[in-house]
Image (tube, coloured by chain):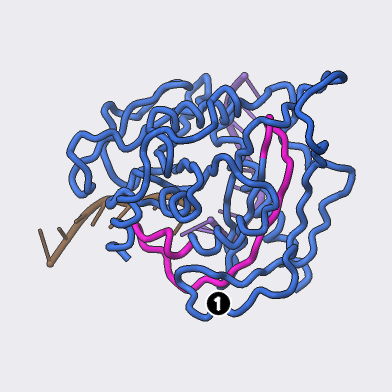
Chain colours: A blue, B brown, C purple
Amino acid sequence: MEALQRDIADVAVFEDALEVAPADVAIDDSFDLSSGVPGPSSDSDSDSGSDSHSDSDPHSDSDSHSDSDSHSDSDPVPPGRQSTLGEQSNVDRSAPIVVGVDQAFLEDAVVSAVVALRNGRIVERTHAVSPLSIPYIPGLLAFREGGPILDALSTLSIDPDLLVLDGSGRIHFRQAGIATHVGVLLDIPAVGVAKSLLCGVPDASVDERSAGWSTPIRAADGVEAPAGTVIGHAYQSRQYPNERRINPLYVSPGHRISAETTLEIVEALCAGYKLPAPTRLADAYADEVKRSILADD
DNA sequence: GCGACAG
DNA sequence: ATCTTGTCGC
């Protein structure tokens, strides 16, 4: 597994090779992000469960039947037309699609939820339920959750321009955290957003920082990269005005993006909240699906 | 050998 | 990640 991670890190591109600029994904504060899915239909989900074609699941029997086990809402795009008259809408249909991914766990399965945003609004949501076989081992997270994430992403009808994953990317012993792993396998730009630091050292102490602050995370001790290499950043996305403290985020490039741009993108996606909007929304959706599953049996 | 260690 | 009510503060 570790050898595979070194191969993945070798193929990974930690430089900007994406068509997404921070300004293109900024979250509008003028819209209520906490409410809703697009379209009038309420989200009364059906089942889910797509078998995994994960790297850890040898018996990947066919997923023949339902390709749409999870509901998905995508807005209709006018055929062959960019912009003409009547372009009063603020909706830029050419804006990049940012997809957030998050998971909720069951007994021996995991719900992987994906939420696609464009111009800060949800354009599609889908999910998959996959079996879990490998335990959580620091440094090997992708082997446990990577397959299930691919399961969910394969149900999306929209093509992501950027993936926002829970966990690290380059901030990893072998520079192949789950964001890098998934990004490389799909060859899609990806960033990793973690709530705690796996490895590497911050340039400055991360304690008691105000919103907007950030400091580089550099390779050290066990990280297989030239000592001093900037592998990510600690970023204080939000802070209370008073005594109570909020921990910073640890953001790092997954694939086809630099550490600097990763920081800018995450900044643009947080909009006053601790977590980037795609992650927050996928988080809530995963819990929603999980509870609905626990509901009937 | 001991400690650290994403979700 | 998950088990879980209230509680402090804007």
Q: Quadrant of residue A150?
A: bottom right
- Relative to residue A238, is residue A73 drawn left or right? right
- Percent across and percent down for residue A135 are 42, 69
Query: Any magenta on residue A284?
Result: no
Q: Taking A83 as reference, is A279 above or below it?
A: below
Instruction: Give the residues in magenta.
Output: A117-145
Q: Quadrant of residue A15?
A: top left
Position of the N terminus of chain A, as image quadrant, is bottom left
- Percent across and percent down for residue A46 are 79, 64
To which chain does the residue with label 1 belong?
Answer: A
Q: Secondary structure at mark 1?
A: loop
Position of the C terminus of chain A, as image quadrant, is bottom right
- Residue drawn 75% across and 28% down? A82
- Percent across and percent down for residue A23 are 57, 22
Q: Look at label 1 and name its amino acid.
A: Ser
Q: Taking A258 as reference, is B4 above or below it?
A: below
Q: Which residue is mark 1?
A: A60
